[in-house]
Image (spheres, rainbow, N blue to C red):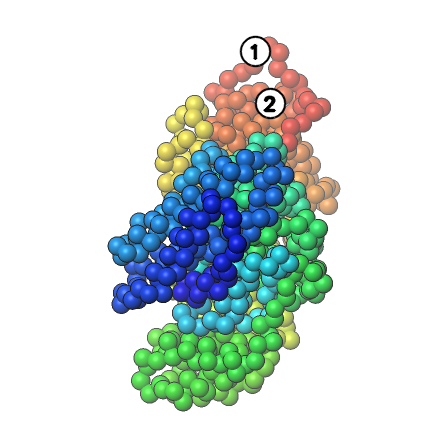
Amino acid sequence: MALGMLAAVSQMFVVQDIRDERLSRLLDTIGKVYEFLTKETTPKDMSGLRETFAKLALMTSGAVQFVKNYSATEDFWKRSGKDVEYETQDVSIAYTEALDDLMEQYRRREDRGVGVDAFRVLEDLDLASLARARGAGPNWTKKCLDGTRTDILMEIIDWIYDTEENVPRILWLHGQAGKGKSAIAHTIALWFENVGGVGSCFCFSRDWQAEHPEEKMFRTIACDLAERDPAFRRALAGALATYGSLKTTSDVALQWRKLILEPLYKVSGHVVGNVVIVVDALDESGPEQSRRELLSVLASAQDAGLPRNVRILVTSRPFPDIKHALSAARHVRAASLDDIPEASEEGDIRLYIMKRLGPLRDFGPTEVYRIAQKAGGLFEWARLACEFVNPGRTVKNGSVKERIDNIMLLPSGGLLDAMYQAILKNATPNDQTALTQFRSVMQQIISTLEPLHIDALCKMRSHFPANEDRHDMVAILESMSLLLSGVTDRSSPVRPLHASFHDFLIDPARSQTYFVGEPKMYNLAFASLRILSNDLRFNICGLESSYISNSEVADLEKRINENIPPHLSYSCRFWAQHLERTAFDLALAKLVEGVVGSEKLLFWLEALSILGVLGNATDALGCTVMWLFSKTQSGFEETITLAQDGIKFIHNFGSAISHSAPHLYISALPFTPLNTMVAKMLKPKFSSLVRVAHGGLEDWPAVQLYLQGHNA
């Protein structure tokens, strides 16, 4: 891919009438780079040179763009009041020295890694203070197989390096489930990262919708760009210094303008090459209303006038709201994978199948051709077929030939449903008990608001209210290894390997016998509250001092792993979200009373502080109040009052508690007003508290402080 990119750069390079002598050395260096590489014999072992070669191609592209657009850049510098001579010399020297150094690396057959931006001074910016999304970056295991999808990948690369003024800044790549959109997105993101480009990749996943990833997308992208470009880092530091609320605000449009657009404009004359942002699986961001503001930003990017070196690749299924927002925008180029002829995709699928199943006995070109043709252009279908045929996987019946014959009998079309039906039929015994247990386990998987490992899922299930639901789920999950991650690899959380499997399970017309229904939250609400009641305790991580902040505890992560295991961490963070989606139930209400109506409330706040998500507590208590209010006659008024008091407690002392968990007991509780429910009910539980002798408040102040939520 790097070789193809360098060839594309050479085609872009047209010798211009450059009268400015300050560019002559840079032009000469660019010419020498191409001349050297076209004459140089390609070394047999490219393994240690690929990154150097790719960086050289990227750097040459950036230098060519700088020369080609010099007139416009020079005019921009003049309008900005900058010293044109100094800026030209600065950038030209930086490019020239970087190219020379990369050439020397190539000659010496080594890759030291060149500080392309050495002429910039790194600005001090604490990126940890930005509330960013977890696990949203690219994944090597999801990239395209080498040698496949080359046409569409080169088409995207050509678009990235297109220097025309009116080239669309956004490319929307769409197609039905299983077409390989995410593989293409991950491949482009990883390639651009590998060649040292300034960019970011944000991958949505249905599994993380509870954390509102759409509210964190632009903050996460801003962090990525700041980590890759010092000039952007300086611009971002300036924005955060001026607007501190940007660190936690849920206002997507404000984040876009202040964290992305304005910093990009400030550094547009300094960034080497293009800035590439990849947004994968936009359709999995959440319900339609959750991405409305995000789509509005992308659709109106033309009005904002993105810098000419910025490219945004967006992938999704063609959902109506996404199609309506993006297809009519002039600055968005739409490309459909569904429009690619099956015949042209079949070659890539054959290559994939041969790579996966080629070593099997009695498996040759005929079998490859049959499976590839049956796939109908769906890469996910081909993946599942390979897993189904492979004798090393947990498929119970038949030889390789018999399995191939079985999948050949499946009806064509119908998305991936026929393949899912075949796999589940093989994995699940055809009796009512087995099907009931299967539905129960899959209900837990799709209802869990954050993917959990098998051990944590089993811990949660052991606290389900009904005895018949506390069965061993490991055997059921192991039979589902073709469709779920985290089953054979216990280090990964359990989740559907493809979004379409989730959709299949909740659609009775598609899943039929294996229909599990929409997520049901009662069991998880019950289990979470029972876990909190059993496992929360005072000073849960054994912190010895209140003189240092949570972040300064050297072994805090180790303490968390040992004392707040994943099932307890999950319960602390999500019990209220499960509760609010459950109808009132007396047994559940008594569990709520046992946590919120006792000193466990303080232990829960302590755990949230240590986990760094105390901002979520007010929302959780607010949900609890509303849930209990529906049945105030049932005797939970005291719990409601304590929950309301808890919200005020957090508003007043949240900053101190969030900074250092011990201050919950050392500072916050002693200074709680005397007439409040927290003081009356919870202070007496702690005998060694500091006491306010004179001047303490009797009631909460009228003006409350505010602690932002959704900071996970």
Residue 308 in the figure: left or right of residue 392: right
Q: Nearer the viewer, residue 532 or 455?
A: 455
Quarter of the rendering occupied by the N terminus: bottom left
Q: Nearer the viewer, residue 534 or 365?
A: 365
Mark 2 or 1 closer to N-term?
2
Under circle 1, the secondary element is loop
Q: Amino acid at mark 2?
A: Thr
Residue under the image location 56 percent in, 14 percent down: 692
User: Where residue 696 sits in the image (x, y, percent)?
Assistant: 62, 15
Say which residue label 1 marks: 693
Q: Nearer the viewer, residue 565 or 246?
A: 246
Q: Amino acid at mark 1?
A: Ala
Badge 1: how crowded within 10 Å, few (<14), some, or many (20+)?
A: few
Q: CA distance from mark 2 to mark 1?
A: 13 Å
Any mark on residue 115, and which?
Answer: none
Residue under the image location 37 percent in, 57 percent down: 32
> Is residue 580 at least partly visible in the picture?
yes
Any mark on residue 672, and which?
Answer: 2
